[in-house]
Amino acid sequence: MGAQQENSDKEIESVRIANDSLEYEIIITDIGFPRFLNTQPPQDYYEINYLERRNHLFVSEYNRRVLNIRFSRDLYPQRIEYNPSVRYGKEVNYLLFQYFRYFSREYNQNFPGLRN
């Protein structure tokens, strides 16, 4: 499992998180996210239980918005498959948590329990 930054022909930065043994992958292609991530506290700042609880709450709200026509399909194109009973590890939970913080700030989206 590891995170890496990638550059494509279009100069889009992405963050990829993968773990083949659990058969999951997260790719964040928002070009501002890597820069935002570099300004945030390190993983050790957070307890894994805190990150898991927050992500469960944020993913539930995000997925609710995917189904709600009041929210833009550009911002909420598809569901996030996040199972709270799966142990994704601290790195994945940290990066997902930070992405929700970034997403909230960058696109002016409020999520319950998220302080910017």
Image (cartoon, grey):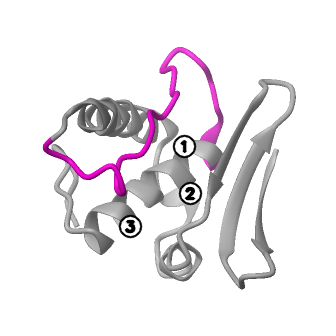
Q: Which is more toward the observer, 91 or 32?
A: 32
Residue 22 in the image, given as x and y percentages of width and height = 77, 24
> Residues under labels 1 and 2: Cα distance?
12 Å
Disc 3 designates what residue? 102
CB atoms at circles 3 and 1 under 8 Å apart?
A: no
Looking at the picture, which amino acid does disc 2 mark?
A: Asp
Numbered range of the magenta stretch = 70-91
Q: Mark on residue 93?
A: 1
Q: Which residue is mark 2?
A: 44
- Residue 11: percent from left, percent from top: 71, 85
Q: Residue placed at 56% from the left, 58% from the top?
A: 43
Report crowding for label 3: few under 14, some 14 to 19, many 20 or more residues within 10 A (C-alpha): many
Residue occupying the point 79% across, 71% down: 6
Name the amino acid, label 3: Tyr
Q: CA distance from mark 3 to mark 2?
A: 19 Å
Q: Earlier in the sequence, mark 1 or mark 2?
A: 2
Residue 22's disc number: none
Left/right placement of residue 83 relative to residue 87 reads left
Taking the spot 82% from the left edge, 44% from the top edge, the residue there is 1
Which is more toward the observer, 6 or 37?
6
